[in-house]
Image (cartoon, rainbow, N blue to C red):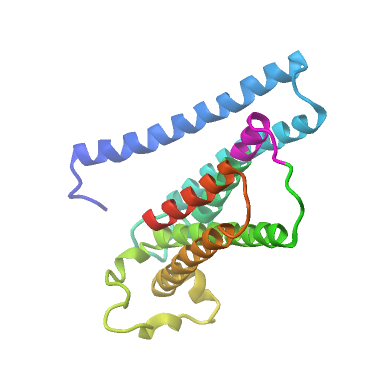
Amino acid sequence: LNHDMTLAEFKFIWYMEYSHRMWGRVVGLAYILPAAYFWRRGWLSRPLKGRVLALCGLVCFQGLLGWYMVKSGLEEKPDSYDIPRVSQYRLAAHLGSALVLYSASLWTGLSLLLPRHKLPETHQLLRLRQYAHGTTALIFLTALSGAFVAGLDAGLVYNSFPKMGERWIPDDLLAFSPVLRNIFENPTTVQFDHRILGIASVTAVTALYLFSRKIPLPRRTRMAVTSLLAMACMQ
């Protein structure tokens, strides 16, 4: 396998993986050591202690998931001669856990650094908050679908847009049986779903931005929504 790989190419892959593992350990220490120090000094409030414990637990869980994911790529499959690859399910779990950890860390940090604005609970504000939560869930789902694209090399199946080849809906979209299996294991379906979710996410973010312009919001909230739209378009 990979007999044509040069030593330089192998070193590049090895150092990429090694750096990722070392960086993960640095992140773990950056969480756990300061948390233990602040806890011992009594600088954490009771609610914050719960968050800190949850974040440290997520860090450990993330490392465990990473090991579990890599392990799937090293398992021998006697009946398969495919290129060794990690499980797309475990890859999606690893990415999803990382997104949850990052989001929770950012939310915790901002809640400590920035005072919360007291806004009147109007009907429009409630609708905006609900829509923002829905958009967040959609973006999260889109990111997870990207992990399935990466895990199956589904991005190599069709490289034309907006059509997939010569068709809007490819013939092999539901080639696997049972049908539900296509969503997670058929590269064509996985790429198709990721395209649809990506378009839906950009549309949802745009609608969120337009809706937010109709409501009097604090300056930093407007900046956050505008930045979200800019990043969605860039992505």
Query: Between 215 and 184, which is closer to the camera in this rendering?
Result: 215
Query: Between 21 and 104, which is closer to the camera in this rendering?
Result: 104
Q: Is residue 53 magenta?
A: no
Residue 131's image quarter? bottom right
| Magenta-highlighted residues | 105-117
- Lateral position of residue 88 relative to residue 132, left or right: left
Query: Between 232 and 145, which is closer to the camera in this rendering?
Result: 232
Residue occupying image coordinates x 79% and y 33%: 47
Q: Is residue 110 magenta?
A: yes
Q: Position of residue 52 (x, y in %)?
A: 70, 31
Q: Position of residue 150 (x, y in %)?
A: 40, 58
Q: Position of residue 61 (x, y in %)?
A: 62, 41
Q: Position of residue 83 (x, y in %)?
A: 33, 58
Residue occupying image coordinates x 44% and y 56%: 232
| Vertical arrangement, residue 111 with respect to residue 142, above or below | above
Residue 68 appears in view = no
In which quadrant is the C terminus drawn?
A: bottom left
Residue 124 appears in view = yes
